[in-house]
Amino acid sequence: MFLENVKLALSAIGINKMRSFLTMLGMIIGISSVIAITAIGSSIQGVVNRQFESIGRSAIYFYVNWSMVDDYVPSEALFSVDELQELKKRFEGELVYADPDVYVTSPVRVGNAEKKIRLDGVDAGYENFADVDIIYGRMINENDVKGARPRIVLEVNSARRLFGTENAVGGQVELVIDGEAVDFTVVGVYREKETIFNQISTSDDLYAYIPYSTAPEEADPTLYIYAFLAPDVDVAETALRITDWLAQMKGMPEGYYVYESALEQQNMINDMLGVVSVAIGIIAGISLLVGGIGIMNIMLVSVTERTREIGIRKSLGARTGDILMQFLTESMIISALGGLIGTVLGVGIAAIGMTVAGVGFTMNPLVIVIAVGFSAIVGMFFGIYPARRAAKLDPIEALRYE
Amino acid sequence: MGEIIRLTGVSKTYDTGKIQVQALKPLDLVIEQGEYVAIMGSSGSGKSTLMNILGCLDRPTSGQYLLDGQDVSDKSDNELSLIRNQKIGFVFQSFNLIPRTSALKNVELPMIYARVSSKQREARARELLEKVGLGERLDHMPNEISGGQKQRVAIARALANRPPIIFADEPTGNLDSASSVEIMEIFTRLNREEGTTVVLVTHEPDIAEFADRILTFRDGRVISDVKKKGQTKGEVTA
Ligand SMILES: Nc1ncnc2c1ncn2[C@@H]1O[C@H](COP(=O)(O)OP(=O)(O)OP(=O)(O)O)[C@@H](O)[C@H]1O
Ligand SMILES: [Mg+2]
C-alpha cells in the first residue's frame, strides 16, 4: 500500500512537473541556504578551534589593567624575571610555564642577504605546551635560557628562505637585538600546523624562537607574562587567584592585573558562532514555513482538481485512511524531494565556497538524512489539512463534481 | 436462491435548504441472488437515487437495507467502503476511469484497496481485460480508447474483487447502439454464466429487454414490476 502511494505520488508529481518543481522551490531555497551556511559555519568553527589548538588551549596572558593606569605604567608595576620564577614556584602544578612574552622584530642577515624576522623569546619547555613541531635539531633548552646563549630555532619556511634548505641546523644568522648585532647559531627547525591565518596573512614573514634571556631589555622587567596553565585546572578560578596574588606581591590595588585566556576567547568565539547558528535556525524555520505553506496551497489545489478521482476511488472501496495516506505521501515526497535537491545544492555551494577560501571542507553525511527527513516532516505537517479534506469527501458529491 | 437485496420502507429526501425533495418514496423491494433487473422510468423519477443507495454510495433517509443479509443502514463510512470493495461492482454512465492511468492500473484499483499483492492484481486484471475483449489494450490510457472500450474497462474493474452483484447506472447512456449491445452481452454473459446479480438503469426499452425483470419508476415510486415469462409481481405500493 505504501509502495502504491509512493508510485501514485511520483506519477502525480511527474504529470505536473513544472508545478511540482515550483512548489518544491520553497523547500529547495530554504534547505540549501541552511545547509550551505551551517556547513560554512562549522568549517569556520573547525578552523578557529584548530587555530586555538595550535596556540595551546591553556595559553594565558597576564598584564596590567589599563583602566587603572593614569599616564604610564609605573616601573614598580613591571615584573622581573625573578618575580616570574617566584610566580611559577607559588603556583606549581597549576601554572606550568611562564615567560616574559618577548616579541621582537629584527633584521636578519645570512651572508649578504638581509631580511626581517619576527622573534619570539621563549623559556625552556615551551614546545610542551604550544603546538611546535620540531623537525630538525632541537628546541630552546634550559641551558640556552640560563646562559643567555645566542641560539635560534627557525620556522621551516624561514629556514628555506634564509638558507635555501629546510635543515638549517648549524647555520649562523646575524640578528640585531637591543641595538646590538649578535651572531646566533641555528639549533633547530620547526613546523607550524597549517591554519587559515598563517596561510593567508603571513606567508612572507620569517619566524623564529630564541631564548628570552638573549633580549634582556625586553624581558627584564616585562609588562606581560605569557603562560600556560595545567590542562586540568579551572581557568577562570585559577587565573583570578593568580592576578590577585600578583597585585598583592607588587603592592598594587586589587584588580590591577588582569588576564586573557585562549580557552575563554575560544569559548567566546564559539558562543558567537552559536548565536549565528540560532539566527540561521530562525531564518531556516521561516523559509521552511513558507515552503510548507506553498506545499499546502498546491495540495489544496490538487485535491480540488482531483475531487472526481477521489470519488471514483471511494466508490471502489478506498477508505478514509487510504485517501489520507495517498495525499500525505504526495506532500511528503514533494517536500522531501525539495529537501534532497536543496541539500545537494547547499552542499555544492558550501564545497565550492570552502574550496575557493582554501579551507578543507568536511560534511557530516547525517546532515543529508536529517535535512531530507525534516523536509518530509514539514511536508507531512502541511499536507495534513489538504489530505484530510480529500479523505472526508462524500463519495456521491465527489463523483458529481464537474 | 436466497435474497441478496431487501429494502424495507427505504426513502430518500434531499434537503437543499429551501426546499425538500423526496426523490424516493418509502419503498419495499426484494432482489434474489442471480436476478437480472432493469430499472426504467422518466428523468428525475429517482432511479439514480435508488442505485446510489443500493450501491452503498449514499444512505437512505429512512428504512432498512439488507445487503446479503447485512444491515447496511447503520454502517460507518469505512465499513461501507469495505462493502463497496468486496460485495459491489459499480458501472457508471460516464465510465469514471481514472485519467492518465492505464486500463490495467484502473482494473487493479479495487484490488489495491483489498490489499491484494501486486503480482496477483496484475494477473487478475489481465484476465479480466481479456475477458471483456481488451487483451490488446492493457497499457492504453483512458483518453486513447473509445467509449465502448472505456465501459468495458469499467466493467472489468467492477468485477475485480468478484462481487456477487453489479450495479450499472445507464451503462449504455453514452454509447452508440452497436457498443451498447456489446456491453449488454457482457452483462448477460456474467449473469447467465457466473450467476452474478445485475441491476441496471436504462432509458431504452430494447436495452431493458436483455433483463429478466423490469422495474418502472415514476415520481420516486415503482409503478410496475414485471418479470418475464409472463410472471408479474403486479403493482407495488408504498
Ligand atoms: N443531490 C441532490 N440534491 C437535491 N436534489 C437531488 C439530488 N440528486 C437528485 N436530486 C433530485 O432527486 C430527484 C431524482 O433524481 P435522480 O437522479 O434519482 O433521477 P433519475 O431517475 O436518475 O433521472 P435521470 O434519468 O435523469 O438520471 C430529481 O428531482 C433530482 O432533482
Ligand atoms: Mg440517473
Image: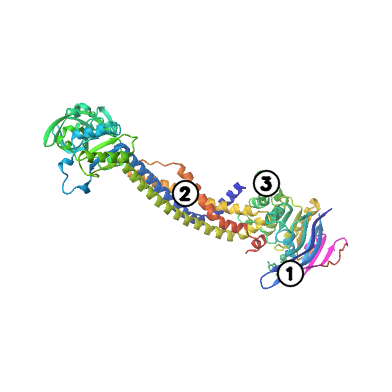
Residue B97 colored magenta? no
Dot 3 crowding, Cα within 10 Å, few <14, some 14–19, many 20+? some
Q: A127 or B22, which is in the foreground?
A: A127
Residue type of the residue flagged with mark 3 = Val
Residue type of the residue flagged with mark 1 = Gln
> Distance from label 2 to label 1 (Cα)?
56 Å
Q: Residue beneath label 2, please?
A: A341
Q: Residue beneath label 1, please?
A: B22
**Front: mark 3 or 1:** 1
Which residue corresponds to the image point at 26% horizontal and 30% vertical from the top-left? A125
Which residue corresponds to the image point at 53% horizontal and 57% vertical from the top-left? A296
Query: What chain is tagged by disc 3?
Result: B
Residue type of the residue flagged with mark 2 = Ile
**Residue A113: image location, x then y, percent:** 15, 35
| Comes first in the chain, label 3 or label 1 | 1
Q: Which mark is residue B116?
A: 3
Disc 2 C-beta below 8 A from ligand 1: no
**Residue A1: image location, x then y, percent:** 62, 47
The C terminus of chain B, quarter of image: bottom right
Image quadrant assignment for residue A257: top left
| Start-end of magenta stretch | B207-230
Which residue corresponds to the image point at 59% horizontal and 57% vertical from the top-left? A388
Q: A172 or A218, which is in the foreground?
A: A218
Q: Is residue B101 above or below residue A203?
A: below
Do discs 3 and 1 belong to a common subunit?
Answer: yes
Query: What chain is tagged by disc 2?
Result: A
Label 1: which secondary element: strand
**Residue A85: image location, x then y, percent:** 22, 32
Dot 1 crowding, Cα within 10 Å, few <14, some 14–19, many 20+? some
Disc 1 C-beta below 8 A from ligand 1: no
Label 2: which secondary element: helix
Q: Pick out the residue farthest to the left.
A: A180
